[in-house]
Image: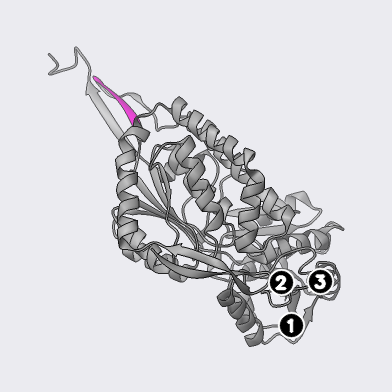
Amino acid sequence: MDTLPLIDPRTGKPRGTGSVAREPQVTAAIAAARRALPGWRALTPKERSRRLDRLAALIEEHADDYAVRERAGTGKPVHEAAGEVEQLADLFRFYAGAARTRTAPAAGTLVAGHESWVRWEPLGVVGVVVPWNYPLMMAAWRCAPALAAGNTVVAKPAETTPDALELLAEHAREALGEGVLRVLPGDRETGRLLVSGDVDMIAFTGSAMAGAEVAARAGTRRVSLELGGNSPVLVLPDAPDDTWAELAAATTYNAGQSCAVPARVITLRANYESALSLLTAALRERRAGRDFGPLNNTDQAARYDRIVASSAAKVTVSGETEIAPGEEGGFWRPTTVLAELPDDDPAVREEVFGPLLTVQAAESVEAAVALANGVPQALAASVWTRDLMTGLDLAGRLDAGETWLNCHLVQTAELPHGGRGASGHGTDLSALALHEYQRPKTVTARLRGAPGAQ
């Protein structure tokens, strides 16, 4: 294999080298998954469930090792990395149970003299491409339901964060069997080779531009795309007192590098000055280095800086950093608020992916909804008000796959998550995600005694 340098985002310095799979390795990994497919799909749901549950147990047994590897590539604080390892195990355990569920369209005597039923069958080998912001969680979001549905998986981590998935592959080999879950470290070309290879489906999480390329390469094969967001946050004058502290915490989780992170605060004109003051104060309490980690890599830091520099905002307020000695060269960025900016500003239209919030004023609630729905992305959103009926009404009117009322980024394995518009399509999380990785087959049999039956 080729190699590439790995950089510690906390220091900006090399931390070693990573392997880069090329065509021979990609072809071999897909072939191994293809060989493992008949045995894996032939297991009863009960047996697949037991093996997935064993994988969850191995993750829990080695939680500290996973957290160390997760931090190496992402620079996440200890509490964030540990929490995400816990969620990783929980997701595999959830889908261990979901593997034994069965949902299908109506079956029975739907045509006179005939009995019909529906089988849900796995698609085959699933190629999974995982981003660098949540290496473990995004792998679980894709791999766990695909495996539970009876598919085998070849997963490619981002080139900057291969560490934790390599450990997951070792434990998957032990718990699930050889070839059931393979991991291919590498760069973008590795991902292209996987997408163009002999896989039956591609599950991709990443940028809209890369998603469009994946869809083009996939041809007629099934594709599930989660392509980022630009979440609006509607804050009404009667918002709860803890609104600003909650938004500040959500905005800085993972340094704002989350597709569903709060991005655009929209409030009414009469409440604008107060909202801007309270939000700025809350964000200043959050410090890079103490409360949240760095941006992930050189390209992301440069992109973030470009968007901020190109903004026409008349008000820019940045917080402070609290960087440990020796980490001054890392990709740290402070909390930032951009206000008094045009509605088509780059910081409004693009997914910034950092610890930053824009603030916009609307003349009415209707105008606020229009601003919220006025960007191409439609992944997540939140509404903040003490009026339950108003909040539920607005949550229903926002164009997003997931909305929250008086909270943000609250997710669990039982609830589906997915985008619309430029944010892609498909369902992650919940038992509904199983159908992303299955296809229905209708079987109809003529009954004895029916006309023409022997």
Please give the name of the residue rendered at 58% of the width and 76% of the height, measured from the top-left corner: 298
Please state which amino acid type lies under the numbered disc 2: Leu
The residue where tag 2 is placed is 357
User: Which callout, 3 or 1, points at the residue further toward the start of the chain?
Assistant: 3
Q: Residue furthest front?
A: 16
Label pair 3/1, CB-CB below 8 angstroms: no
Task: Examine the rendered structure and indicate whether residue 136 appears above or below residue 11.
Answer: above
The residue where tag 3 is placed is 322
The quadrant holding residue 231 is: bottom right
Please state which amino acid type lies under the numbered disc 3: Glu
Give percent across and percent down for residue 15.
Answer: 59, 67
Left or right of 324, for residue 87: left
The quadrant holding residue 281 is: bottom right
- Please state which of residues 80 and 342 is positioned toward the viewer in this rendering: 80
Please state which amino acid type lies under the numbered disc 1: Glu
User: Which callout, 2 or 1, points at the residue further toward the start of the chain?
Assistant: 1
Q: Secondary structure at mark 1?
A: loop
Give percent across and percent down for residue 61.
Answer: 63, 38
Left or right of 378, for residue 20: left
Please give the name of the residue rendered at 39% of the width and 40% of the height, measured from the top-left corner: 178
Question: Is 64 colored magenta in this rendering?
Answer: no
- Check the image and tell me how it is coloured: one colour
Query: Which label lies toward us, 3 or 2?
Result: 3
- Please state which of residues 315 and 354 is positioned toward the viewer in this rendering: 354
Task: Examine the rendered structure and indicate whether residue 117 appears above or below residue 306.
Answer: above
The disc label shown at residue 340, or none: 1
Q: For the residue carrying disc 3, how many other residues have a C-alpha within 10 Å: few (<14), some (14-19), or many (20+)? A: some
Please give the name of the residue rendered at 48% of the width and 35% of the height, measured from the top-left corner: 175
Which residues make up the magenta segment?
A: 113-119
Q: Secondary structure at mark 2?
A: strand
